[in-house]
Amino acid sequence: MRSSGPAIISHPGPTVSACTERELIDRIRQRLAPPPPWVSVGIGDDAAVVEVERNRLEVLSVDAVVEGVHFDRSLSPAAAIGHRALAVNLSDLAAMGATPRLALLSMALPGEFPLADFDGIADGVAALAAATSTHVVGGNLTRTPGPLTIEITVVGTVKPRRALTRGGAREGDELYVTGTIGAARTGLEILRAAHPTAMHQTHAVYESCVARYQRPEARLRVGVLLARNRVASACVDLSDGLADAVRQIADGSSVGVEIQADLLPVDPGARAWFESRGADPERSALEAGDDYELLFAVRPRLRRRLNAIARLFDVPITRVGVCTAGRGATLLRTDGLVSRAIDLPRGYGHFR
Amino acid sequence: MRSSGPAIISHPGPTVSACTERELIDRIRQRLAPPPPWVSVGIGDDAAVVEVERNRLEVLSVDAVVEGVHFDRSLSPAAAIGHRALAVNLSDLAAMGATPRLALLSMALPGEFPLADFDGIADGVAALAAATSTHVVGGNLTRTPGPLTIEITVVGTVKPRRALTRGGAREGDELYVTGTIGAARTGLEILRAAHPTAMHQTHAVYESCVARYQRPEARLRVGVLLARNRVASACVDLSDGLADAVRQIADGSSVGVEIQADLLPVDPGARAWFESRGADPERSALEAGDDYELLFAVRPRLRRRLNAIARLFDVPITRVGVCTAGRGATLLRTDGLVSRAIDLPRGYGHFR
């Protein structure tokens, strides 16, 4: 009686918390049939890229946000939670250089979830979808005895041979980051510290950090232009922080990376916040997640082409380092006349 | 300071449990921009259908299974849970007449989830994916403080003007159902009743019910042939039971439906089980979910074409009723010489 088999017994063995996310992904991958030729980018990058037919590429990504893990209902209005759930997915498309086309919205709802918040979340998703020409064509609703979970699948398109992946960077390529870093984490910490104090008492420089946390903006146009003009040789988004993103390009492209601490575009509000806490601003910003900026590699000879693109945007694009022949990830710090090279801080090691 | 706004306060207002799933979906839909012309079927059917370019249709669906709501780890081996999570999605594609192409696998994992069960779920997904030529090209892993939640997005293809929807049935169309009904619910009830008694003590007729619950089979080939040969005018799957499926076609096609109780293909194991419990077998089978068979409407003049298709399959295809000019859903029962028409049992009214 093959299918009823033994029911699951509580195993005394290891649990998923003993693994990194990458290790868990590998355990899935090794069980699957080898991908067919029409899968250009499979499991493990920001998104999957499939060639639906000759010269037509589709980019697919899915991301879930879980209450108590990725957001806190007491810290964000419902519309901001909806906005953010879609934005983190659009950021994956941006990192591939893809233009969003459609989305599927799936929610697992606690039974006593307020209808007003349900509407607010839908409002936030709908507004960002409209602003980015992403059409919500379907989804799923289920109840859950657990926390509110919003999961969005996005599908976008990219021209053939234009998709940006983690691989492709070479020794000598320069590394750039869009916008500023550390702001979203600062916004979250401010919200946690200020709560339940009314937010209008907060200093203006912090308000933009709160906005960056609550309503991240996917760098869709930058990503598309970097891909379309073949400027970037590799690209990832900063969902888990710059230090993690740097390592993803290093691993994906089999290169080393050197980041210069004094070049890092630490957000002014974040810098003030980290310093007021006695923390190292550069190191804190490197480890801070949720920024949804892009990190990408550019061959030095394409610097002029990058500058032409950069001028089209209000958002700064900053050179922060270079790809090297070695394999490690190094942070260069200059204190006065003394330069020190230290290992780049690692992201979280265990499955989160 | 638009984006920080007021944090969510516990609302005293209504909760989502006051709404049906359909009402919640409508609340989302009314917030979205009108769908562009390339969306052939949007929110509300088994799956979405989009025309990615002229004469190329894609079918997308997403479904989540939540521990404690859709499955119980003590009643199914991990591989069966993985199988089922993919099968319920493939069933949505089958109901659209689509051929599966790719899938995204997303899991929210409790921290102490056993790695052996994680592997088992991946095994179950991988085996069914391989058997149905569905390629898992990506996904997402996150931890959750709540129950294990597996969410799969599937993408399939269907020829233009061949997609099967809930609309399209007309007065006089006959209604058919694949396979038998009531088996999966019976399997679940047997597992609950037998647990923790060893399953090998169970009668053979019940073993197939347990298998039907644990490893449902999406009717992919039937769905594709019904669509390709333009046999079915409307089609849905039986995820929430035949009574619910009948109402979906009635509502989607603006017709009435009449189901004949004595034609219903109640599974023999289910019939024995329901009768042993003192329950009405037909009524119980109509309300039983999880069968993942197909219900479809066929114009009477296409009956011969349907018979030709039916002969290709081992699975029975049974006529169970007809579409009428009225709007209700009626169950006709014949007791001896007396015929009675009663309202078809309703599915669950409130959001589950």
Image (spheres, coloured by chain):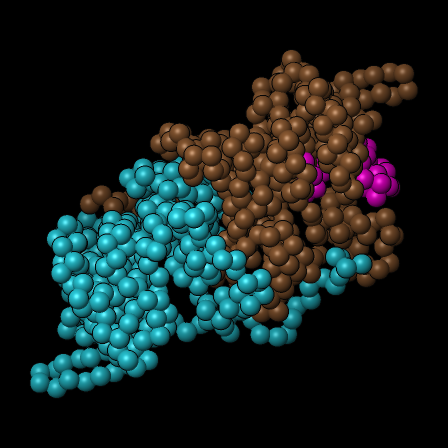
Chain colours: A brown, B cyan
Q: Please name whichever residue, A23 or B106, is drawn nearer the observer in this view of the structure.
A: B106
Q: Quadrant of the C terminus of chain B?
A: bottom left
Q: Quick one: which residue is furthest to the top in this view? A: A325
**Residue drawn at (78%, 20%) of the image:** A332
Horizontal side, residue A165 vs residue B155: left or right: right
The extreme left residue here reads B337
- x, y (%) of residue A119? 60, 66
Q: Residue A284 occupies which quadrant of the picture?
A: top right
Instruction: Tell whether position A174 is magenta.
Output: no
Judging depth in this view, the residue of A200 and B341 nearest the camera is B341
Residue A287 higher or lower than A148, as above or below = above
Q: What are the residue bounds of the magenta stretch?
A: A266-294
Task: Tell me where residue B340 appears, x and y as whole percent.
Answer: 19, 85
Residue at 35% over, 67% down: B167
Residue B86 visible? The answer is: no
Report the residue that reaches farthest toward the front. Answer: B54
